[in-house]
Image (cartoon, grey):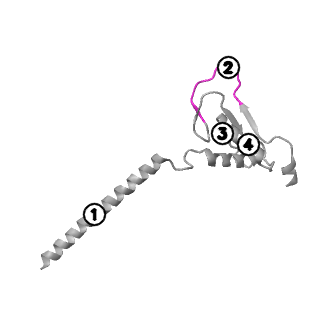
Amino acid sequence: MKDAMHSNESVVAVRHDDTGKRRSRAPQYCSVCTARIWFEPIEMVEPEGVPEPRLSWVLCRACHQLLQNEMTRSPVRSPLRLRIAMGIVAAERWPHAYSTRVREYINDRRMILFIAIGLIVAMVLHLILIVMVAGLR
């Protein structure tokens, strides 16, 4: 464990797409915040030595900066350090991690509709029951 915590070697592989040739302009989106990346996407690849499967991510600058901050805060220097830091950043920046007002509004509308239909069905059943009881007399 001491070797993993005090090693000074780099454990992250970062690939910038700096090739001089023209590449297709397919839209790229950040793996964490799902924002469109217009210029210079940063590809993160897990280093050798992590358990399979080796994961890779495409990050925007903001998510990459947060990832770098999270990795500098971590005292652990194992190959799993990147995966753990990515999970922490994704928990904060993923759009579906926290409820939005639109989603709450849609869920509230569904609940109101469910309650209204339930009340209408209950009223109709009570009406049928009252008519049946009145018909017996």
Q: Residues within 10 Å of mark 3 (few under 14, many from 20)?
A: many
Q: Which residues are magenta?
A: 16-29
Q: Horizontal and vertical percent for residue 69?
A: 73, 42
User: Main structural element of the magenta stretch: helix, strand or loop?
Assistant: loop
Residue at 63% from the left image edge and 27% from the top image edge: 39
In the displayed structure image, the side of residue 33 where residue 112 appears, left or right: left
**Residue beneath label 1, please?**
121
**Residue beneath label 3, please?**
63
Query: Between marks 1 and 2, how big is the CA–CA gap?
Result: 67 Å
N-term mark: 2 or 3: 2
In the displayed structure image, the side of residue 52 where residue 36 appears, left or right: left
N-term mark: 1 or 3: 3
Q: Secondary structure at mark 2?
A: loop
Q: Secondary structure at mark 1?
A: helix
Q: Horizontal and vertical percent for residue 41?
A: 65, 31
**Residue beneath label 4, please?**
69
**Mark seen at residue 21:** 2
Figure quadrant of residue 11: top right
N-term mark: 4 or 2: 2
N-term mark: 4 or 3: 3
Query: Between marks 2 and 3, how big is the CA–CA gap?
Result: 26 Å
Circles 1 and 3: CB atoms closer than 8 Å: no
Front label number (2 vs 3)? 3
Front label number (1 vs 2)? 1
Residue 19 highlighted magenta (yes or no):
yes
In the foreground, 58 or 107? 107
In the foreground, 85 or 92? 92
In the foreground, 61 or 132? 61
Given the image, on which type of amino acid does mark 2 rest? Lys
Q: Horizontal and vertical percent for residue 136?
A: 13, 78
Circles 4 and 2: CB atoms closer than 8 Å: no
Given the image, on which type of amino acid does mark 1 rest? Val
